[in-house]
Image: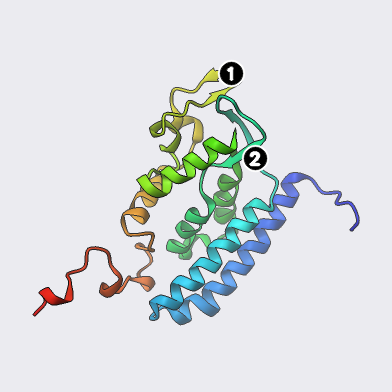
């Protein structure tokens, strides 16, 4: 393969354009057509999550300069792209219609923290088990962040995650990792957590 003579920014934008096109096609041609079939919807959504995730990891990372102690060559995409893709799907009428807005979220997901494998796995586990948001995961896990060797005291300001995404992420996890804004994909009662057991309905 010939060497690519485009900048990292150009490559990142091209990946985003391909991803935007693919997600739009699957949203219109698969997801909406299966909106009344919860099992199919979850399978299609998982495929779309992976499309976004793989596009992020195939793109040049944005190195923020933020790092942990004992940092090695592990770059943590601190926004959790697979989770954040659902923010796009929940607000598909905005982010799958306007590439500029989509690209803002795409770039946010390319931002990284330099750390090591152990911390990376710890943070990933805490987000899943404890429901920590991307904004609070390092602080609540007791992991200090630095920039140029100086400790960052305000993680929220340094990570610069829009509040609307953080609030959405809380709701997404509370709702058992289901879309909850996009009314086209309301979760059937039979699949909701905490549903009334059938033997108590009679």
Query: In the image, is 100 to the left or to the right of 11?
Result: left
Q: Give the colouring mode of the picture.
A: rainbow
- Where residue 66 sits, quadrant-wise, is top right
Horizontal and vertical percent position of residue 112: 59, 39
Q: What's the distance in space between the residues labelled 1 and 2, CA to CA?
A: 19 Å
Query: In the image, is 108 to the left or to the right of 16?
Result: left
The residue that disc 2 covers is 62
> Can you say whether 21 is above or below 202 in the image?
above
- Extreme-right residue of the structure: 2
Q: Secondary structure at mark 1?
A: loop
Horizontal and vertical percent position of residue 41: 44, 74
The residue sitting at 36% across, 45% down in the picture is 130
- Extreme-top residue of the structure: 150
The dot on residue 149 is 1
Disc with the residue nearer the chain's start (1 vs 2) = 2
> Can you say whether 179 is above or below 66 in the image?
below
Question: Which quadrant: the C terminus?
Answer: bottom left
Question: Which quadrant: the N terminus?
Answer: bottom right
* Crowd around label 2: few <14 · some 14–19 · many ≥20 (10 Å): some
The residue sitting at 38% across, 33% down in the picture is 140
The residue sitting at 48% across, 45% down in the picture is 124
- Of badges 1 and 2, nearer the viewer stands 1
* Crowd around label 1: few <14 · some 14–19 · many ≥20 (10 Å): few
> Can you say whether 22 is above or below 99 in the image?
below
The dot on residue 188 is none
């Amino acid at each position: 393969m010939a060497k690519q003579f485009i900048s990292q920014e150009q490559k990142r934008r091209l990946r985003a354009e391909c991803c935007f096109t693919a997600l739009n096609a699957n949203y219109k041609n698969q997801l909406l057509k299966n909106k009344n079939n919860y099992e199919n919807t979850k399978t299609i959504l998982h495929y779309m999550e992976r499309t976004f995730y793989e596009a992020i990891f195939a793109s040049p990372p944005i190195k923020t300069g933020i790092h942990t102690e004992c940092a090695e060559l592990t770059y943590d995409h601190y926004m959790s792209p697979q989770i954040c893709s659902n923010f796009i799907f929940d607000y598909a009428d905005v982010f799958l219609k306007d590439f500029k807005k989509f690209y803002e979220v795409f770039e946010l997901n390319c931002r990284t923290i330099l750390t090591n494998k152990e911390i990376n796995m710890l943070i990933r586990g805490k987000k899943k088990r404890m429901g920590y948001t991307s904004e609070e995961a390092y602080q609540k896990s007791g992991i200090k962040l630095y920039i140029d060797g100086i400790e960052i005291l305000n993680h929220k300001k340094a990570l610069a995650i829009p509040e609307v995404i953080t609030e959405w992420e809380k709701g997404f996890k509370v709702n058992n990792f289901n879309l909850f804004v996009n009314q086209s994909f309301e979760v059937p009662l039979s699949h909701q957590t905490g549903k009334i057991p059938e033997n108590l309905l009679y």
